[in-house]
Each structure stands twice: as C-alpha cells, then as structure tokens.
Image (cartoon, rainbow, N blue to C red):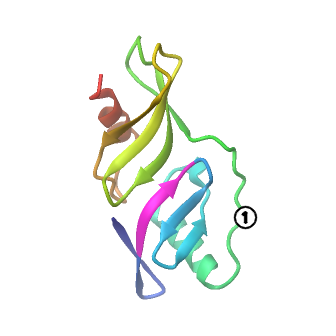
Amino acid sequence: MITLTVNGEQVDCYNGDIVKDTIETSVGTVPFEWSTGFAPEQAIYAIEQFINGTPVEVQSTGRGWIIDLASETHPQAEINTIDFMSNLVNFRWIDSAYTGDCAAQLVFTVETTPAEVAGAITALL
C-alpha cells in the first residue's frame, strides 16, 4: 500500500487502474491521469480535488502503459493495473506468442521507476 499525505491527512492508495485512469483510495475512487506516470504530487493534487468535490477530468486512452522490453520473444507489455496491497503489476503481453494476462511481483513505491517495472516483468522470462 502507498500512503500519501493530503491536506495533512493520511490517504491510503490500494490499487491503480491505468486503463480506467483511477486510483482506489481510502477516500474513494479518484480520477487520475495515468498516461503521465505516477508522480506523488500529481496523485496528491488529484486526491485533493476529489475530496474538495471537483475531481480532475482525465483524458483516458482506454489503454494501459505500453512498455518496451529487452526481449525478442516478448517485446512489449501493456500494464493494466497495479495492486499496491499485494505488490502486483498486472499486464498483458503484446506482440508475442502468448497474449494472455500475467502479473509480476513488484513493491511499488512513490520512487518506482519505469525501468524497475520493466525489470520486474522481464524477470519473468
């Protein structure tokens, strides 16, 4: 779980849905623009706006994060959700022989980089 301080209060983040552009939090389901990544300041702002009754408008693409992998057999993955409670990155393979859903263990923090996410997925190969 990721805990952020919003207006002096602790808000727990349980799950990030990149496809639907939301964050499941202890204050409710907050609209969040995942296409720009996960920056604590952006998440705090989105939660503040949600609490104030003026949730941010998101420009949802209806897709997850597409990341390139250093693999000929599995060149890309689309990250769909991040479960902050069970430390799972849920994704599907793109342009590979296997196109099903998959998950990789990763303790996601506010400092997690895209390279760390890619590394956790590539470690499954």
Q: In this view, does 31 lie to the left or right of 103?
A: right
Q: Is 71 in the magenta?
A: no
Q: Is residue 57 left or right of residue 118?
A: right
Tell me if residue 113 can be seen.
no
| Residue pictured at 52% horizontal, 63% vertical | 23
What segment is highlighted magenta in the picture?
A: 12-18
State the image quarter where residue 58 is shown.
bottom right
State the image quarter where residue 30 is shown.
bottom right
- Residue 33 lies, in percent from the top left, at 62, 56
- Residue 89 lies, in percent from the top left, at 39, 44
Q: Which of 36 and 19 is in front in this view?
A: 19
What residue is shown with label 1?
57
| Residue pictured at 68% horizontal, 83% vertical | 53
Quadrant location of the C terminus?
top left
> What secondary structure characterizes most of the magenta part?
strand
Which amino acid type is shown beneath numbered disc 1?
Answer: Glu
- Residue 57 lies, in percent from the top left, at 72, 64
Q: How crowded is mark 1: few (under 14 residues within 10 Å), some or many (20 or more)?
A: few
- Residue 70 lies, in percent from the top left, at 38, 20
Quadrant location of the N terminus?
bottom left
Secondary structure at numbered mark 1: loop
| Residue pictured at 52% horizontal, 50% vertical | 37
Tell me if residue 83 can be seen.
yes
Q: Is 17 in the magenta?
A: yes
Q: Nearer the viewer, residue 82 or 108?
A: 82
Q: Is residue 29 above or below residue 17?
A: below
Q: Is residue 78 above or below residue 87?
A: above
Residue most extreme to the front: 100
